[in-house]
Structures are given as structure tokens and as C-alpha cells.
Image: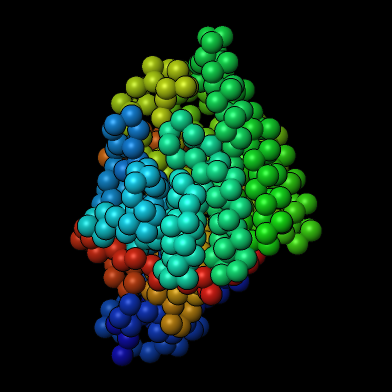
Amino acid sequence: MFDCIIKNGTVVTSEGTCPYDVAVSGEKIAAVGLRGTLGEARQTVDAAGKLVMPGMIDPHVHIHHPFQGKYAGDDFYTATRSAAFGGVTTVCDFGIQWDKERCIRDTCAARKEQFSEGAVTDYAIHACPTRVDGETLEQLEEMIGDDTPSVKLYMTYSRQNRMASDAALLEALAITARKGGIVGVHAENDAMCCYFSDRFKAEGRTSPADFPRCKYNLVEAEAVNRAIYLAKATGGNLYIFHLSCKESLELLRKARAEGVHVCAETCIHYLTMTDEKYSRPDGANFICSPPLRSAEDQEALWEGVREGLISVVSSDHCGFTLANKAVGENDFTRTPNGLPGMETRLAAMYTYGVRSGRISLPRLVELLSANPARIFGMWPRKGAIAAGSDADLVIFDPEASCVVSPETLHSPVDWNPYGGERLYGRADQVLRRGELIVDGGEFLARPGSGRLAERRAADMIRL
């Protein structure tokens, strides 16, 4: 007898939609079959009229992120609780080597320990070194062969002590050519970022409306071009975080046509918002890097999503509060970069993507769950609805809607980029490894019940 059967729903995977029931035993999916064919279970969940999807995977989040001696407004419990209400069952954060005296292995171990104490979703860590030396490269090679097969390198933020050199990028990509794994980049030209920031400040052009002019498209596209060139030269595996403009997309298209091992994500805010936000009275709240772009860039990104050129849509969540944002006093050079987004990613993608007719339901699941699992070495343990996969499941009501506000969300962050807007779709129930953690408006998981997701370089799939 199964522990649970989710019956009468429509199962949506990256392969299609089917009128299936899903049986769960322990932490795993035990069987998937046509409605009414799976037999008996100790518990049943009626999903009539709803969609049953694999748990969402957000491969790009920054929880409890530092800025000027303070931190963003959510912690490892509250951030992952909020994510779970948005259908997310696994998040990927970063072991950033802020302290260059601490080796990258210890940096990542410390980040995992922070998650273990509070997280309610499962989690993974991308190693994020800020120095290049023999010890770092040796440890990266060992970690890629162990349980940390993904690396992120910042190509900017030299003034924040987190930029890695081009030499580090070259060597990390070479490791992935030998050992597997993948190197992701935050692609912005650091010299341009520093120069234009200083110039705009000297000219008194520091309002939010000036921000996208300071970090204009070339700032990103040059760095994307450089990273792709190094990936091609080494034969390594490259992932571009938060690709945001049409020029970068064209570089990606050309590189993939040439056989370079590169794939890319964009973020939900680049698909649903434009740089017009910066002209609002609260425009400083929307400062993020890269900046929100033009409507023309946005339409190019949607085309990239539709044709499969963009493989993932992440949140790039960073839960800065209104008080955090106000520190900059409407000066983009002093305002923390980042938007809260884990809880609203699924509903926003459903609203702007599926309901608008831009993408299908299977494509939504591919972008938000299956492809992150494939790229980062979790497939098919996660991102799939199949016998033997983790029972990470979302029962999604496509007809539900709400007007977004701090009161309708489940985060201590006191604002949201979609505030006042109606989003459609709601994760009514969420199972994480077979355990019901969200049931309607009730949260059932205990702090620290999330687990480090098993990942292997050998399981990474090139898209």
C-alpha cells in the first residue's frame, strides 16, 4: 500500500500533460499511472481541476545577503518558507569567498551549515571563489568531483571584494573540460561598471532613471562575449546567469550554433518588467544588476525562451527590505542591488507566459524545474515526476489569483516588485520528499528540515 496517492489531477512534466495519478512511498515517487489505476493508499489528495507539477527548482538565489555591514531582510528559514509557498522545493545559493583568508572548501561548508540550521526546502551551493591560486584551483577540482559540481565567478564587483579574475575563469573552465561540472558567470565588464559609475556620480546623474544608462547593454554583452570565448578556447562548460539583453542573446545563439558548451538563464523580472520602473517614485527599489532593460530587449528574451535558447528562468532573489533600499537615498551608486522573487516566480511565469499564450505548461516546467535539475546535476532525482524520483510535488490551482502585497505573501520582506498587481495561479499543496510542507495557507515544515541536494558532475546534462 502506498503512503499517498495524488488523484484526479493533470500531471505536467517537461514532456507533456497527462491525466495521471501519482503515488508516493516514503520520500520517493512510487508509481505514476492513469487515473484510478494505482490501487490503495493510506492517504489520498484530490487534485481535481488542478495541475500536478514537479517541485520548482530556483538555481539562483541570495539568502541573507550582506550589504554595507547589514543583511537582507529574510533568513534561511523565512526565505525558504516563502519559496515553498511559491512551489519551490529546492534552491541553489552561493558560497561566496568574501573572506579571502578562508579557503573555498571551508567557505562552502560554512554556507551549507547555515542552510542546515534553518532551511525548509532542499538546497545546493555553487562554489564562488574570489581568488585564483593553487589551493583554490586544486580544491575546485576536488569539489567538482564531489558534491559541489557548479562554480560561479563574478566578472565585476571588484570594489566589493568578490570579483574573480579572467585567469580564474580560464582555469575553472579548463577544469570542467577535464572533470565535468559547470562554471557560471555574472557577466558585466568591471572596468566599464567602475568608470561609468564614477562618471555618472561626478556629473550628478545618480537617480534610478540614470541607472540603466550607466550599465547599458554593452556592459553585459562584452563580458558575455569574453566568457564565451574562454569557454570555446578551453572546451569547458559555461552557464550565463541572468542574461538580460538582445546583444547577449545573439552572442549565445552564435556560440551554440558553433558547438560551444554554453547555456543561459534569464530572470523572471527581465521577462515581466522594463526599465520604465526606474522612472517611478519608488524606482530605487527596482535596482538590480544587470538593470531592467527596454521593451525591445524583453521581447528578444521571450523569443529566446520560446525557441529554447534560454534554458532556465530563475528569480535571482535577494530580499532587501524598503529600509535596506532607502540607505541609498535614491542614489543608484549607493543602493543595494536585488529584488525579492522566489515566492512569486511561478505565478508570474504562469501569468505572463502561459496565460498570455507565450509558452506552454510543459515549457514552464522545463524552465522552472526540469532544466535546472538537468544542468546542475539533480536529474532525475529532482525536476521529474517518475518512479524513483524524489516526491517533490506541487499541486497548482491555475484558476486562483491574488493581488500581490506583503499581506498575501509569506516573507518578512516588506515589499514585492509585483505589489498591487494580480497574478494568477497558486501552489495549494507542496510536498518535499513526500512530506506535505504547504497545505493551503498552512505551513507544516520545521526549521532545518531541508536537506543538501545530492548532485554529481556525471549527472549534469548539456542542453
The residue positioned 49% from the left and 84% from the top of the image is 33
The residue closer to the viewer here, 105 or 348, is: 105
148 vs 286: above or below: below
Figure quadrant of residue 127 = bottom left
Residue 354 pos. (x, y %): 58, 53
**Residue 78: x %, y % from top left:** 27, 48
Work out whether 280 lies above or below 359. Answer: above
The picture quadrant where one finds residue 451 is: bottom left
With 18 as the anchor, is 318 left or right in this view?
A: left
> From the viewer's perspective, is 256 left or right of 378?
right
Relative to 335, say whether 369 is above or below.
below
Residue ID at (57%, 63%): 175
Instruction: Identify which residue, 120 or 198, lies in the foreground.
Output: 198
- Is the C terminus in the top left, top right, bottom left or bottom right quadrant? bottom right
Give the quadrant of the N terminus.
bottom left
In the rendered image, the residue lying farthest to the front is 134
Give the x, y percent position of residue 252.
71, 50
The residue shown at (62%, 65%) is 177
Please give the count of numbered marks on the rendered protein. 0
Please say if 453 is above or below 73: below
Residue at 35%, 22% in the rendered image: 326
Horizontal side of residue 404 vs 361, given as left or right: left
